[in-house]
Image (tube, rainbow, N blue to C red):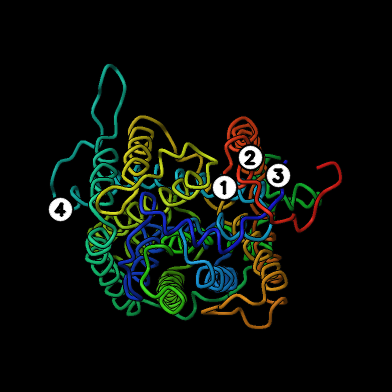
Amino acid sequence: MDWRVKSVEASIADAGDEERSLKRSLGTWDLALMGVAVAVGAGIFSVGAQAAANFAGPSVILSFVLAAITCGLAIMCYAEFASTVPVAGSAYTFTYATLGEVLAWIIAWDLILEMFTASAVIAKYWGVYLGEALLAFGLPFAPTITVAGIEVSWPAFLIVAIFTALLVAGTKLTARVGAVFTLIKVAIVLFVIVVGFFFVRVANFTPFIPESRPVEGGGDAWTQSLFSWMTGAPPAQYGVFGMLAAAALVFFAFIGFDVVATSAEEVKDPQRTLPKGIFLGLGVVTVLYVLVSVVMTGMVSYEQLAQEEEPSLATAFRLVGQDWASAIISVGALAGLTTVIMVLLLGQARIVFALSRDGLLPRWLSKTGSRKTPVRIQIIGGAVVALVAAFFEVGLLEEMINIGTLSAFVLVSIAVVVLRRTRPDLPRGFSVPLSPWLPILSAALCLWLMFNLTTLTWVRFLVWLAIGMLIYLLYGRRHSRLRQQGASELPLVTPQGA
């Protein structure tokens, strides 16, 4: 295997290839809105309620804070890298410059898993929420049609096709369309928060961390967290460990900021703009999620939420006699999912673009069109996502999104320490404070959240990695431009037998 690194200078030089370059058109507010667009989806109305009901009770508020801190530490590492190596590829590019080609391929494969799965899952849900929003206003709606005996989710196919066409037309145009939907959904979230505060009862916050109790039925090895399975601890809910397990679940709310970093090559003045835009977006998202969780757990007892089959913020409003809120929340969820799909499709294309430009995937994919967008990748990727979302059941793969993101966060946190030692001379628009301690803490927290995901998720993840390594060995390694050019960079660490 080839453990050589690709120099920062080589990555930046590749961005100047006229046939394979992207247009710098995004500013600070574009990035901040992109972060809010991808992180605030339908989950803001449901994931907190489910975590409170099944794992944490009112302490889900702390779960969101812990998840936000973990994400914030990792995003600081992303911001340092993106301001130092402002080219497409995000964690893949950063890992290639520090830990070598093999690990870079693995993390790119993880990111493709994250963004492809998330795009398909959320496109599927978009059709469901479209139906709920229309029915809330008394409009009949059929979310599926039958083609040759197969049920097809036509709204999922439609929304992916629309945003694929917009992304081909130009990143700036897509960002403007996304900004409109983002402002709509933030306005709805703020409205719901303000109204909800009138129904908050302080008594519902007690006990703040409910006493731990065994899970009814005990659970099985596949649904246990990897940590519980490895330690032999019986499955339990609530208590401190329930709050930590909820943090692993609600971390889903913060995925996407790594996607923002994939647009580094399309950002104006990236050394200053990228860190500002990413942190501004993360701050807004954290405040919104914490406020929603405060309102939700204050409106009704977590025990009432636990009795519901699918607890959500709309459930809390219904339990206090405010059924009208479900229509508003459905519209907010629909607007939320719309922008998430947009940013994920963009991020997926940029990762594949970077792999193709480096020769690890076919080079013809990375040629850009007249509008300086990766047209071929965008169309092929959009078509695959649209077909999977329309024809297949993808909801079972939701946790795969989390593990793909967290694995990328771990490697980027380690890589930022490595680059500080190997290339202290590079200009950095932003530097992680208290390095190496904060990056190490970031990697440790992300690993802890990974161990709180189920054993079944880990098995699926390992199978995905095995498929990725097979593709790398059969194609990527043989066609790697770094290997073909006989790059002079030596490996940072050469494993025995490599």
The kind of residue on which mark 4 rests is: Phe
The mark lying in front, picked from 3 and 4, is 3
- Please tell me which of labels 1 and 3 falls first in the chain: 3
The kind of residue on which mark 1 rests is: Asp
Decide if residue 352 is in sight here: yes
Left or right of 376? Residue 161 is left
Question: Which mark is on residue 465?
Answer: 2
Q: CA distance from mark 3 to mark 4?
A: 58 Å
The mark lying in front, picked from 1 and 3, is 3
The mark lying in front, picked from 1 and 4, is 1
Image spot of residue 247 (x, y percent) = 58, 64
The kind of residue on which mark 2 rests is: Leu
The secondary structure type at the circle numbered 1 is helix
Residue that badge 4 annotates:
137
Residue that badge 1 annotates:
110
Query: For the residue carrying disc 4, how many other residues have a C-alpha within 10 Å: few (<14), some (14-19), or many (20+)?
Result: few
The reply to whether dot 1 and dot 3 touch (C-beta < 8 Å) is no
Residue under the image location 61 percent in, 46 percent down:
485
Residue under the image location 70 percent in, 51 percent down:
4
The secondary structure type at the circle numbered 4 is loop
